[in-house]
Amino acid sequence: MNKYSVRIKKLSDNAVIPTYGSQFAAGADLYACEGEAVTINPHETKLIHTGIAMEIPTGYAGLIYARSGIASKRGLAPANKVGVVDSDYRGEIMVALHNHSRDVQTIENGERIAQLVIAPYVVADFVLSEELDDTDRGAGGFGSTGKK
Protein backbone atom coordinates (compact mmCIF):
# COMPACT_ATOMS: atom_id res chain seq x y z
CA MET A 1 0.00 0.00 0.00
CA ASN A 2 1.46 3.34 -1.07
CA LYS A 3 1.09 6.28 1.29
CA TYR A 4 1.52 9.91 0.30
CA SER A 5 1.34 13.12 2.27
CA VAL A 6 -1.44 15.34 0.93
CA ARG A 7 -1.43 18.92 2.12
CA ILE A 8 -4.83 20.13 3.38
CA LYS A 9 -5.91 23.70 4.03
CA LYS A 10 -8.82 24.34 6.38
CA LEU A 11 -10.96 27.15 4.99
CA SER A 12 -13.17 27.15 8.08
CA ASP A 13 -12.47 26.50 11.75
CA ASN A 14 -15.31 23.93 11.69
CA ALA A 15 -13.82 21.93 8.80
CA VAL A 16 -12.96 18.29 9.46
CA ILE A 17 -9.88 16.71 7.87
CA PRO A 18 -10.87 13.62 5.80
CA THR A 19 -10.59 10.32 7.69
CA TYR A 20 -10.39 6.67 6.71
CA GLY A 21 -12.92 4.37 8.36
CA SER A 22 -10.61 1.37 8.52
CA GLN A 23 -6.99 0.38 7.96
CA PHE A 24 -7.50 -0.66 4.34
CA ALA A 25 -10.30 1.71 3.30
CA ALA A 26 -9.72 3.16 -0.17
CA GLY A 27 -11.95 6.19 0.39
CA ALA A 28 -11.50 8.90 2.98
CA ASP A 29 -14.72 10.36 4.38
CA LEU A 30 -15.54 13.96 3.52
CA TYR A 31 -17.51 15.96 6.09
CA ALA A 32 -20.14 18.67 5.70
CA CYS A 33 -18.95 22.10 6.82
CA GLU A 34 -22.05 24.25 6.91
CA GLY A 35 -23.11 26.90 9.41
CA GLU A 36 -26.39 25.10 9.95
CA ALA A 37 -28.25 21.98 8.84
CA VAL A 38 -28.98 21.79 5.10
CA THR A 39 -32.32 20.44 3.89
CA ILE A 40 -32.41 18.63 0.54
CA ASN A 41 -35.87 18.08 -0.88
CA PRO A 42 -36.74 14.97 -2.91
CA HIS A 43 -35.03 14.99 -6.33
CA GLU A 44 -33.12 18.17 -5.46
CA THR A 45 -29.36 18.80 -5.59
CA LYS A 46 -27.48 21.07 -3.20
CA LEU A 47 -23.80 21.98 -3.05
CA ILE A 48 -22.42 20.99 0.33
CA HIS A 49 -19.27 22.70 1.58
CA THR A 50 -16.44 20.68 3.12
CA GLY A 51 -14.41 23.67 4.28
CA ILE A 52 -11.17 22.19 2.93
CA ALA A 53 -8.85 22.58 -0.04
CA MET A 54 -5.99 20.21 -0.81
CA GLU A 55 -2.91 19.62 -2.95
CA ILE A 56 -3.49 16.34 -4.74
CA PRO A 57 -0.16 15.00 -6.09
CA THR A 58 0.57 15.49 -9.80
CA GLY A 59 -0.48 12.41 -11.77
CA TYR A 60 -3.35 11.71 -9.37
CA ALA A 61 -6.97 12.82 -9.12
CA GLY A 62 -9.36 12.97 -6.20
CA LEU A 63 -12.47 10.95 -7.07
CA ILE A 64 -15.56 11.76 -5.00
CA TYR A 65 -17.92 8.81 -4.58
CA ALA A 66 -21.10 8.20 -2.60
CA ARG A 67 -20.84 6.74 0.87
CA SER A 68 -22.68 3.44 0.80
CA GLY A 69 -24.61 4.08 4.02
CA ILE A 70 -26.28 7.37 3.12
CA ALA A 71 -26.73 6.27 -0.49
CA SER A 72 -28.55 3.03 0.36
CA LYS A 73 -30.38 4.18 3.50
CA ARG A 74 -31.19 7.79 2.64
CA GLY A 75 -30.89 8.05 -1.16
CA LEU A 76 -28.13 10.69 -1.05
CA ALA A 77 -25.28 10.56 -3.57
CA PRO A 78 -23.16 12.93 -5.65
CA ALA A 79 -25.27 14.35 -8.47
CA ASN A 80 -22.54 13.75 -11.04
CA LYS A 81 -22.07 10.16 -9.77
CA VAL A 82 -18.29 10.61 -9.48
CA GLY A 83 -16.78 14.02 -8.86
CA VAL A 84 -13.26 14.66 -10.14
CA VAL A 85 -10.81 16.91 -8.30
CA ASP A 86 -7.79 17.63 -10.52
CA SER A 87 -4.31 17.94 -9.02
CA ASP A 88 -4.05 21.61 -10.04
CA TYR A 89 -7.33 22.62 -8.32
CA ARG A 90 -6.83 24.61 -5.12
CA GLY A 91 -10.38 25.74 -4.33
CA GLU A 92 -12.78 24.37 -1.76
CA ILE A 93 -13.86 20.80 -2.30
CA MET A 94 -17.64 20.75 -2.50
CA VAL A 95 -20.06 17.89 -3.06
CA ALA A 96 -23.14 18.30 -5.25
CA LEU A 97 -25.35 16.02 -3.17
CA HIS A 98 -28.55 14.78 -4.82
CA ASN A 99 -31.57 13.39 -2.98
CA HIS A 100 -32.83 10.40 -4.99
CA SER A 101 -35.43 9.54 -2.36
CA ARG A 102 -39.04 10.65 -1.89
CA ASP A 103 -38.27 12.05 1.56
CA VAL A 104 -36.77 15.34 2.67
CA GLN A 105 -33.21 14.71 3.90
CA THR A 106 -31.22 16.87 6.30
CA ILE A 107 -27.43 17.12 6.32
CA GLU A 108 -26.01 18.13 9.69
CA ASN A 109 -22.79 20.08 10.11
CA GLY A 110 -19.91 17.60 10.55
CA GLU A 111 -21.82 14.71 8.94
CA ARG A 112 -19.97 12.38 6.57
CA ILE A 113 -21.35 13.14 3.09
CA ALA A 114 -19.10 11.42 0.53
CA GLN A 115 -15.77 9.66 0.19
CA LEU A 116 -12.62 10.73 -1.61
CA VAL A 117 -10.36 8.22 -3.38
CA ILE A 118 -7.01 9.52 -4.59
CA ALA A 119 -6.08 7.53 -7.70
CA PRO A 120 -3.45 7.67 -10.47
CA TYR A 121 -4.53 8.46 -14.01
CA VAL A 122 -3.08 8.38 -17.51
CA VAL A 123 -3.08 11.36 -19.87
CA ALA A 124 -3.73 9.94 -23.33
CA ASP A 125 -2.18 11.18 -26.54
CA PHE A 126 -5.14 10.54 -28.87
CA VAL A 127 -3.89 9.45 -32.30
CA LEU A 128 -6.28 9.38 -35.25
CA SER A 129 -6.23 6.03 -37.05
CA GLU A 130 -8.12 4.52 -39.98
CA GLU A 131 -8.12 1.05 -38.40
CA LEU A 132 -8.18 -0.42 -34.89
CA ASP A 133 -6.93 -3.86 -33.81
CA ASP A 134 -9.56 -6.61 -33.87
CA THR A 135 -10.76 -8.27 -30.64
CA ASP A 136 -13.16 -11.11 -29.87
CA ARG A 137 -15.67 -8.57 -28.56
CA GLY A 138 -15.41 -6.20 -31.51
CA ALA A 139 -18.09 -3.50 -31.52
CA GLY A 140 -20.41 -5.34 -29.09
CA GLY A 141 -21.83 -2.71 -26.77
CA PHE A 142 -24.34 -2.54 -23.94
CA GLY A 143 -25.07 -6.02 -22.63
CA SER A 144 -23.12 -7.72 -25.42
CA THR A 145 -21.02 -9.86 -23.06
CA GLY A 146 -23.97 -11.04 -20.95
CA LYS A 147 -26.15 -14.13 -21.26
CA LYS A 148 -28.63 -14.28 -24.12
Image (tube, rainbow, N blue to C red):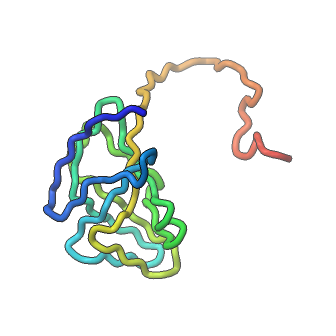
- From the viewer's side, name the closer residue of 5 and 67: 5
Counting from the top left corner in percent of width and height, residue 97 is at 39, 64
Give coordinates of residue 106: x percent, y percent.
Answer: 37, 77
Side of 63 where 129 appears, left or right: right
Q: Is residue 50 left or right of residue 121?
A: left
From the viewer's perspective, is 10 left or right of 67? Answer: left
Q: Position of residue 114 (x, y in %)?
A: 39, 58
Residue at x-position 52% and y-position 75%: 101
Quadrant location of residue 34?
A: bottom left
In the picture, which quadrant includes the N terminus?
top left
| In the foreground, 143 or 50 | 50
**Residue found at the very far right of the displayed protein:** 148
- Which residue sits at x=23%, y=76%? 36
Q: Is residue 79 above or below residue 73?
A: above
Residue at the limit of the structure toward the front, as seen here: 23
Where is 95 relative to 107, above or below?
above
The residue depicted at 42 percent of the width and 32 percent of the height is: 121
Number of on-image labels: 0
Front-most of residues 18 and 96: 18
x and y percentages locating residue 94 in the rendered image: 30, 57
Point 40% across, 45% down: residue = 117
